[in-house]
Structures are given as structure tokens and as C-alpha cells.
Image (cartoon, grey):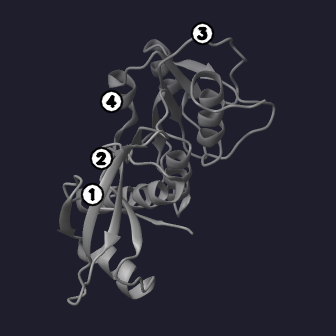
Amino acid sequence: MRINRIYTQADLQPNIEIQLEAGPSLHLLKVLRLKTGAPLELFNGDGQNYTCELLDSPKRIANVRVLGAQTNPTESYLHSKLGIVVSKGDRMDFVVQKATELGVHEIYPLTSERCDVKLNTERAEKRQQHWLKVAVSACEQSGRSCVPSIAPMQNINQWIKEVNADLKWVLHHRATADRSPAEAQSVAILVGPEGGLSETEVELAQQHHFTPTVLGPRVLRTETAPLVALSVLQQRYGDFTLL
């Protein structure tokens, strides 16, 4: 029997009863039409899975009893950070969703010289909150209990200068293949827009210890490249296993 996983911002601990927020309540009671006693799994980003059951909920707000807690084993021990220049349409949604499934810890939406997306402060904040919801949904689906952070939009130069990691890649289709270190506990990946990063941006990244990296002989789209890079790095340094 499939048990529904739901994200909540509530403080969770065993042997308490809570009321869920309006959004999760609507989903459980009106969309899924769950009945009293239905099993649930809640998470709030603290790395735990909370086994729960649905209580009688007469006011369209789901009442839940928390029964127990278990540490979620799905978090990768490779700490990954993704800086990606924002693209038009729903490409960024796709990247956030799939990167979350691949275990990313931090996502940084960036602007650059060739970025086509221009947002004022209010719209940028709305997009940040939207991407966070996409990440939460991806966590519910993929079994994660830690939601990756979505940073406010920032200029690419600022991020290049400030990000720290054991291994830093700037994806660049004109780079030459280079050998990566044998071990790394944290990685940072920089991905440009469809038009690519400017030579000035690539040079700045190199000055701050980014390695220009090519993933293969074919040119990948901006929404494909970070997912391939995350997969390669999870295989090499993280928790992906390939026999």
C-alpha cells in the first residue's frame, strides 16, 4: 500500500497531534479523499521521516497524530551546490525538480551577461518561492526529507567569488577533459545560459579555482548539462552505485 508523503512546516515529534496547513489539508482531504485512520508520512526538512495517521478532520483542516520518527537515509554525503543562469519558460522548474531528485543541497539562480530573463525584485522573490515549492514537491516524490535551499537571484560574478567547495566545475563545451581529484566531500557546478558563458565569466571562474569541464562530445542544453554533471559527481563521489 502506497503511503502518501507530505511536507509541513510544523514542528514534529512523536506522540503529538497537529493540524496541517491549508494546502496539505486540501490535498489530503479533498484531492486524495483520505479517511480517518489513513497512514501518512510527514517531513519538515529536519532529515526525519514521521509516521502518522489521519484523525477526524471535520473543519477541512487535517488533524494528524504523529506516531514515530526515523532518520531518513536518502541524503547524499556529497554536498552539492548548483549555480545556474536562469532561462526562459519552465526550464528552471525542470532543473530544480530533477536536481532535487539527484540529491542537490543548494541551488543558486544566477544572472549573467547573456541572461535573457529580467526580473524586478518582487517578481524575483515570487520565482524563488515558486522554485522552493517545486523542490518540496520533488522531495515528496523522491523520498527526501531535507529540502534543498533555493537562494535569491544574484549576479554570477558574486556567486563565483563567494562559493566554496572541494571541487568546482564550470561547464564549458570548449573545455578539454581534465582529471578530477580522487576524493571530494563538496562540489559546486556552474552552468551558463543557452548562449553560454562569456569568456570574461569563464576567466573569472578559473581565477576562483573553477575547472572548465566538458561532459562529452555533444553540446548539452542548459537544463540537461547540470543534471548530467550531478549524476557523474554522485557516481564518482556520492551515493550513486553502478555495477
Sooner in the amino-acid sequence: mark 3 or mark 4: 4
**Residue flagged by tag 2: what amino acid is it?**
Pro
Label 2 near label 1: C-beta < 8 Å?
Answer: yes
Identity of the residue drawn at 53% across and 63% down: 90
Q: Nearer the viewer, mark 2 or mark 3?
A: 3
Q: Read off the residue under disc 2.
A: 152
**Residue 213 sits in quarter:** top right
Identity of the residue drawn at 45% across and 59% down: 140
Question: What is the distance, in whole Å, between disc 1 and disc 2 at their CAs?
Answer: 7 Å
**Residue flagged by tag 4: what amino acid is it?**
Gln
Q: Nearer the viewer, mark 1 or mark 4?
A: 1
10 Å crowding of disc 2: few (<14), some (14-19), many (20+): some
- Residue 44: percent from the left, percent from the top? 30, 53
10 Å crowding of disc 1: few (<14), some (14-19), many (20+): some
Q: Secondary structure at mark 1?
A: helix
Q: Read off the residue under disc 1.
A: 125
Q: Read off the residue under disc 3.
A: 181
Q: Read off the residue under disc 4.
A: 158
Label 3 near label 2: C-beta < 8 Å?
Answer: no
Q: Nearer the viewer, residue 148 or 108?
A: 148
**Residue flagged by tag 3: what amino acid is it?**
Pro
**Residue flagged by tag 1: what amino acid is it?**
Glu
10 Å crowding of disc 4: few (<14), some (14-19), many (20+): few
- Residue 5: percent from the left, percent from the top? 43, 63
Sooner in the amino-acid sequence: mark 4 or mark 2: 2
Label 2 near label 4: C-beta < 8 Å?
Answer: no
Q: Nearer the viewer, residue 19 or 103?
A: 19
**Residue 18 sits in quarter:** bottom left
Q: Quadrant of the C terminus?
A: top right
Up-down relation of residue 133 to residue 231 (above or below): below
